[in-house]
């Protein structure tokens, strides 16, 4: 059961500069930031709506508006790039029938590019809901996806 | 053959992860010692050790502390920069996973020295599991009384490379977009919420308890005279052993790749190495006997930076890799200053054109001209360093560009 977003935001209201922590908490509950929650955050932290939108859209890990239950991020930084990240991208797109940046129609998976996730000891790397998977091969993609239940 | 050292990282059999494990090995004794010292003497000891910032800027840590110490105000802050975003870098993650209390102890010593009661750890959003572990470590250290009245809070970043820049990091803790500030004033004088704030890298802070415990002379006896100590390096790309190593700062790049990294994978030949992360310069074979210390690297037009060592073998397409890097900077530019916002975009455009066989000789000279403008005119380190991969490869690997021109 998802808690009400105003309650989630209220828990961080007294924290100086706490809007980013509040957005993280929203994403832990919803996997994204509900659009209406941005105005609510602006009010709670005494910012203009424009400022609250500015913060929400500045950071790559925040997404205003719905996305899937499993957020798959593929690192495309140089070490992963030369290790064949593009082939992993192609395999993921083929398996899920969507392009990078899209969400499957059942709302289960979202594919996003990311820059370095700091697991460069075993490239290429993808993360699923922030959990890293190392040394990913195009052939191994199916098995990884099957674990997302 | 050069040897690895274990100074910051625990020895193989050692488990310093928990509060108990760390104190059993003598942890938090340095904090006690520091608190018995005169604050200026303590700062002087750190300054004399010549510990220079390990995040990439190489500024003397004690000197930085002295700036904050000198400001007469009630509120000051110690901030641990754990926003390591340089592609190919994961040393701070390893430190926070293996010796979290060493970092906390370093923060507490800094807090005592400058007169701060509140600390923040700004940890990148890619490491939520590290945030969890840190919160546990802070709780254990608080419950035991080791930290005294020093409070620490972890704040999580959200995927913005520019927040590794200290003033952008401060903006982010304040709940704003992570855009760098105009300097001066510098954070040690006017930082978080306008108060004196020391922003030190994880690796820098981890050294502090060791320097307090063993003394400045011990520290100065390790590695290069002008950049003493060890350095954590993360080896990636076409090197046999992709791993983290800790080495004295007077080893050479060749030793790093061949002695510690085991050479190039698949019996191939070396082509280039990029050190310091994605903003570092590319280094060709003939410069591999350079020592890795800060000043030696600067002297060859490269940087030590974060200590990432990205190795490329003879089959790698330099122009293609640099195009990917140019795209990174276009994406990560915060957009505040025009030379960076426009410059990274145009640089990527030209690199894309060249990589796809549609570039001309004009593109090469324009890249060089734009690069020089960005180095001088961009507001922060991101934009100033962004042209380095382009400029150094145009210098050392120009033939590869020429071969792709229309």
Image: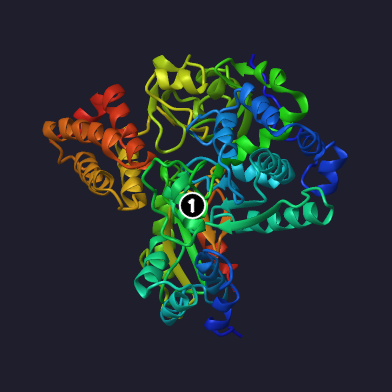
Q: Nearer the viewer, residue B337 or B149?
A: B149
Q: Is residue A19 visible?
A: yes
Q: Position of residue B284 (x, y in %)?
A: 38, 21
Q: Position of residue A105 (x, y in %)?
A: 41, 79
CA neighbours of label 1 inside 10 A, class few (<14), some (14 to 19), many (20+): some
Residue at position x 15%, y 38% in the image: B359
Task: Relative to B339, say whether B61 is above or below.
Answer: above
Q: In this image, B206 relative to A116: left or right?
A: right
Task: Relative to B115, say whether B220 is above or below.
Answer: above
Residue assigned mark 1: B194
Q: Nearer the viewer, residue B70 or B50?
A: B70
Q: Nearer the viewer, residue B308 or B270?
A: B308
Q: Residue furthest front?
A: B72
Question: Where, quadrant-wise, is the C terminus of chain B in this rendering?
Answer: top left
Q: Is residue A125 visible?
A: no
Task: Relative to B215, say whether B104 is above or below.
Answer: below
Residue at position x 81%, y 48% in the image: B146
Q: Position of residue B91 (x, y in %)?
A: 59, 39
Residue at position x 65%, y 18% in the image: B220
Q: In this image, B278 relative to B42: left or right?
A: left
């Amino acid at each position: 059961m998802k808690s009400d977003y105003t309650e989630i935001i209220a828990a961080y209201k007294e924290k100086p500069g706490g809007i980013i922590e509040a957005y993280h908490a929203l994403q832990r509950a919803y996997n994204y930031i509900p659009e209406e929650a941005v105005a609510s955050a602006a009010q709670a932290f005494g910012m203009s709506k424009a400022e609250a939108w500015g913060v929400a859209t500045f950071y790559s890990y925040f997404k205003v508006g719905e996305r899937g239950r499993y957020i798959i991020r593929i690192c495309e930084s140089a070490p992963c790039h030369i290790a064949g990240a593009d082939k992993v991208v192609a395999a993921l797109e083929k398996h899920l029938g969507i392009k990078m940046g899209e969400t499957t129609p059942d709302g289960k998976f979202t594919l996003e590019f990311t820059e370095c996730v700091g697991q460069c000891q075993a490239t290429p790397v993808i993360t699923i809901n922030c959990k890293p998977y190392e040394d990913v091969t195009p052939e191994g993609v199916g098995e990884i996806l099957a674990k997302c239940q | 053959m050069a040897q690895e050292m274990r100074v910051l990282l625990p020895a193989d059999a050692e488990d310093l992860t928990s509060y108990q494990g760390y104190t059993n090995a003598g942890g938090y004794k340095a904090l006690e010692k520091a608190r018995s010292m005169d604050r200026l003497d303590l700062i002087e000891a750190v300054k004399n050790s010549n510990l220079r910032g390990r995040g990439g800027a190489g500024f003397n840590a004690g000197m930085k502390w002295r700036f904050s110490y000198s400001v007469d105000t009630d509120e000051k802050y110690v901030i641990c920069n754990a926003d390591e975003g340089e592609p190919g870098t994961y040393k701070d993650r390893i430190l926070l996973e293996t010796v979290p209390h060493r970092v906390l102890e370093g923060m507490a010593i800094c807090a005592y020295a400058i007169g701060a009661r509140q600390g923040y750890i700004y940890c990148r959003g890619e490491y939520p599991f590290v945030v969890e572990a840190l919160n546990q470590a802070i709780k254990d250290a608080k419950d035991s009384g080791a930290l005294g009245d020093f409070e620490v809070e972890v704040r999580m970043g959200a995927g913005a490379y520019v927040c590794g820049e200290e003033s952008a990091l401060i903006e982010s803790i304040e709940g704003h977009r992570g855009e760098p500030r105009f300097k001066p004033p510098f954070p040690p004088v006017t930082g978080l919420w306008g108060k004196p704030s020391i922003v030190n890298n994880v690796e820098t802070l981890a050294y502090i308890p060791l320097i307090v415990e063993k003394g400045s002379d011990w520290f100065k006896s390790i590695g290069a005279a002008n950049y003493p100590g060890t350095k954590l390096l993360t080896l990636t790309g076409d090197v046999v052993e992709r791993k983290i190593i800790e080495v004295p700062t007077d080893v050479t790049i060749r030793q790093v790749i061949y002695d510690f990294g085991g050479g190039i994978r698949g019996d191939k030949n070396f082509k280039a190495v990029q050190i310091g992360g994605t903003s570092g310069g590319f280094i060709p074979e003939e410069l591999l006997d350079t020592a890795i210390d800060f000043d030696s690297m600067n002297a060859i037009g490269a940087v030590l930076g974060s200590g990432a060592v990205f190795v490329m073998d003879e089959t790698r397409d330099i122009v293609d890799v640099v195009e990917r890097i140019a795209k990174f900077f276009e994406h990560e530019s915060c957009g505040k200053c025009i030379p960076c916002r426009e410059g990274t975009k145009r640089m990527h455009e030209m690199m894309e054109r060249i990589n796809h066989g549609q570039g001309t000789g004009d593109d090469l000279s324009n890249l060089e001209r734009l690069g020089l403008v960005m180095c001088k005119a961009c507001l922060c380190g991101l934009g100033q360093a962004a042209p380095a991969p382009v400029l150094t490869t145009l210098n050392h690997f120009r033939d590869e560009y020429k071969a792709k021109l229309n």
